[in-house]
Image (cartoon, coloured by chain):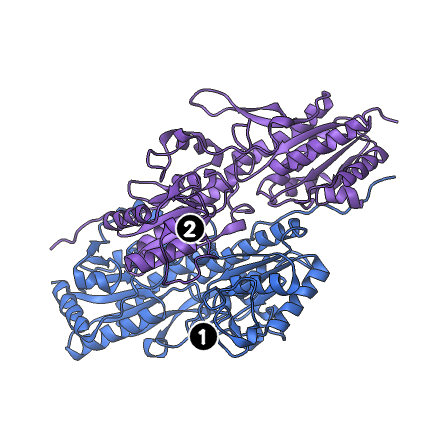
Chain colours: A purple, B blue
């Protein structure tokens, strides 16, 4: 038997637009590493437990080429947290398959699952290298400069915000306020990425509401009024997890957010829906809200070429880590200092990553918390890849009389 | 004074991704037609009344080139319906400006406004040629094969549905049902365009709910259950104007739709939100819904090249119509018979267009009303332009044992 054994890989957690590039990176790197088999599990650890496995080493090259730019998780994903009994079963199956390298592509929860599998294998004396390959659009993993998936999702948010800005500007006589609700869990990274929508002074977004900023109704409404006075319209990008002054989610029963009688169902609405109703009832202007939701994370038309390349590279680096005998590590992205963007891969201990989350640091926000800083723009700009679609404007040339 | 006088152009109604291409077509065609001035009104007829006018003839060529692919209405739009008094004022201003050709780029309501301006001018003995240039993502104007704006919006819906399909497939263990709410007023053209998302048997959408199909809760739930049994997930594209058996909007207080107690605010939710709650409470499976809303209509990353070219061409044809002395007409798109797509422009009387709307004909639906027919796919395919992003799949190769 080949002493290297088999390599097993899975995808877990919410999909991203580039998570398949990481999978392809794993398969391509492993192909030249001498593994007996390269195995994929369907729906992460669930597929391992149910025996839903696929031979990845036998996939023709053109399948991998097409998969590289295909959004969402081709193997299927899972949010299942295995029980201790299931961990025991998983280790038995790993042993049967002679899996010696286990690569798990996922976020925070998946890192914890991988750590537990590694611990269970170790407890049973089965030697296996466990390597976590990061992905999340939320960019909230610690110990890495950023996370594959974030660049493309951030690009998507920026483009949609630019489009919403042009739309709202044109329709300002009818619907002068627009709220765009975006994902991001407990961190504002995705809401903040909307700042890249701006091409000129006065462009949308006019207000960014990350979950890190605690919002009061009066403060919010005053800012909307100022934007309306200045621009004739107001485009707001609000995190779905935006919070009121007492820290509870906006749209829930938060007394600091005031009442939204015109709408009537404050307990159950989302943040954008709630804030729209607040604008309509208090400022007496029409407000629209959109919720692209999961469409942000899985998109074939907003791929960042930088994100795509890095996603493949972290997959490859995961295999190299296992090959070199590392275990219980996550691949990280390490940005080199300097004005020119350069990023390499590194490794961090899994134990330091699981169950932790990275909020946006204070220096990435504007002082009032409703916008981003120059430092954040410098941070994110290279991650979203090539230039966004750039839009024209009529010159304000007066008539000859 | 030049007998040809000035040309005035405006944009009205909801923006589209290609409405600026029509504006550019008007300006480019008019530039070589000998008009004394080419004038744009900001926010449609509102800008005419308030004197917010811009010299379009003096715009540098590169401004027009950039504008051509810039979504939303660069002049600004309006939904204002002028009063009879305002019509009188408008005619006076047209006379002052010596406007002899008036081009209005818009939908149904704008066609009616243009017709009324023409009638008011005629009543006061002022000779002006009024030409309507069509736009609407809803594709619901009569007497034209299709409407500029629809191809790009349909392309966007199809891409988002394809993306949502891949996302839901990957996450079927967690969130097996997804509902995508799309615009379209009283016609199913946009919901129907989601059918182009399919690359293979079993691909999303698994259910299309246009407003033309009256839905009962039991029928809907039975179809979701069948899709779940067959595909492990269900992706539904539902028109925001979807209707229950009694014809009232889904999400309103329609007794035929049953109760959605788990959610609690049936009177005020939208169609997708309501149906998600229904799935969750009745089938006990998790359902997510997304509402891209106006993001569908204004997008720089889903332009159909065919739509873009036709949008410019209808603008040019509008000027040619006025130049040839036609008035009270709308430019139409005329599809030539045959397997190869060819489309030219024609003209129809404004009086036959205003205040009418074109639903999807019965032969464009599948027999049960929850999908489209082959004839519809043949109809729409050329309109969305080049191929959509095409996605790969792993081959289901079993392990060697």
Where is residue A240 drawn, in percent x and y? 47, 48
Q: Quadrant of the C terminus of chain B?
A: top right
**Quadrant of the rendering where the N terminus of chain B is positioned:** bottom left
Callout 1: 10 Å neighbours few (<14), some, many (20+)?
some
Q: Nearer the viewer, residue A69 or A198?
A: A198
Q: Is residue B103 left or right of residue A257?
A: left
Instruction: Confirm whether residue B304 shows in the render.
Output: yes
Label 2, on which residue? A254
* Residue B126 vertical position relative to residue B136 in the rendered view, above or below: below
In the picture, measured across the screen, residue B359 lies left or right of residue B206, that is: left
Q: In front: B288, or A30?
A: B288
Q: Which residue is mark 1?
A: B358
Marks 2/1: CA–CA distance: 45 Å
User: Percent from the top left, x then y, of residue B84?
Assistant: 19, 75
> x and y percent of residue A30 in the render?
73, 30
Which residue does the image show at 43% across and 45% down from the upper left?
A243
């Amino acid at each position: 038997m080949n002493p290297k054994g088999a390599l097993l890989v899975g995808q877990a957690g919410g999909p991203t637009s580039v998570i398949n590039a990481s999978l392809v990176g794993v398969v391509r790197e492993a192909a030249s590493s001498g593994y007996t088999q390269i195995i994929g599990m369907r729906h992460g650890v669930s597929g391992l437990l149910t025996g839903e496995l696929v031979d990845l080493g036998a996939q023709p090259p053109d399948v991998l080429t097409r998969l590289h730019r295909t959004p969402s998780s081709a193997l299927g994903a899972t949010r299942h947290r295995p029980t201790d009994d299931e961990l025991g079963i998983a280790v038995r199956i790993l042993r049967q398959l002679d899996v010696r390298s286990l690569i798990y592509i996922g976020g925070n929860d998946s890192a914890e699952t991988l750590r537990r599998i590694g611990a269970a294998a170790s407890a049973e004396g089965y030697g296996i290298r466990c390597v976590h390959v990061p992905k999340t659009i939320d960019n909230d993993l610690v110990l890495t400069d950023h996370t594959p998936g974030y660049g493309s999702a951030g690009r998507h948010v920026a483009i949609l915000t630019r489009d919403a800005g042009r739309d709202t500007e044109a329709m300002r006589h009818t619907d002068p306020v627009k709220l765009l609700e975006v994902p991001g869990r407990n961190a504002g990274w995705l809401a903040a990425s909307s700042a890249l929508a701006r091409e000129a002074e006065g462009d949308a977004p006019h207000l960014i509401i990350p979950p890190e900023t605690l919002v009061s109704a009066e403060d919010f409404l005053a800012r909307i009024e100022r934007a309306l006075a200045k621009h004739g319209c107001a485009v707001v990008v609000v995190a779905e997890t935006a919070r009121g002054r007492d820290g509870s989610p906006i749209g829930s029963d938060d007394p600091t957010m005031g009442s939204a009688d015109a709408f009537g169902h404050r307990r159950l609405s989302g943040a954008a829906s709630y804030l729209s109703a607040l604008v309509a009832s208090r400022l007496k202007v029409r407000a629209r809200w959109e919720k692209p939701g999961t469409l942000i994370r899985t998109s074939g038309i907003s791929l960042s070429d930088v994100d795509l390349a890095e996603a493949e590279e972290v997959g490859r680096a995961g295999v190299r880590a296992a090959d070199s005998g590392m275990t219980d590590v996550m691949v990280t992205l390490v940005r080199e200092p300097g004005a020119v963007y350069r990023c390499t891969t590194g490794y961090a201990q899994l134990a330091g990553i699981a169950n932790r989350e990275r909020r946006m640091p204070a220096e990435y926000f504007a002082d009032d918390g409703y916008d981003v800083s120059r430092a954040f723009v410098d941070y994110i700009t290279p991650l979203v890849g090539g230039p966004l679609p750039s839009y024209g404007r009529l010159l304000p040339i007066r008539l000859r009389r």
